[in-house]
Amino acid sequence: MSESTPPDKKSDETPDAPPGELGDYKRPTMYFEKERSVGAGAGAWMGVGIEFALFVVLFFLGGKWLDGKFGWDPWGAAMGGLLGALMGMASLIRRVTRMSDDGPSSQGPSGGDA
């Protein structure tokens, strides 16, 4: 006589597995377990740093131009540099916040722009 499943078990249930083993079940991969390319995240972070530096330099140069045009000698460049630093910091915070809302990913702080 051949063995068959007991009548109380349904045929679509997974067979009894040893403790700690669930047969064909594979648990979902967590976001921190996924393989990520180091270069993708690093490139995005370098972009954030370059963006911050560009804000400071361009606003400083704009202030320097205003110094020459209106004779505000040290104040235009100083205010331009400070305004550039504030704008760069605001941009950096916005991008990092967006990244933390999406969860860590291989895309870096830009959320997929890189």
Image (tube, helix red, strand yellow):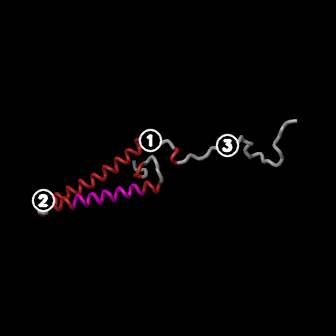
Instruction: Please determine whether, in this image, residue 27 is positioned above or below residue 97.
Output: above
Q: If you read the primary sequence from the N terminus, does the residue marked by circle 1 or circle 3 appear first?
A: 3
Which residue position is annotated with label 1? 37
Mark 1 → mark 3, Cα distance in angstroms? 32 Å
The circle on residue 79 is none
Q: Check if residue 90 falls in the magenta segment.
A: yes
Q: If you read the primary sequence from the N terminus, does the residue marked by circle 3 or circle 2 appear first?
A: 3
Q: What element carries label 3?
A: loop
Q: Residue at x 16, y 58 (%)?
A: 65
Amino acid of disc 2: Gly
Mark 3 → mark 2, Cα distance in angstroms? 76 Å
Choose mark 1 or mark 3, whichever is in front. Answer: 3
Crowding at label 2, few (<14), some or many (≥20) Cα neighbours within 10 Å?
few
Prevailing secondary structure class for the magenta stretch in the rendered image: helix
Range of magenta residues = 79-97
Which residue position is annotated with label 3? 20
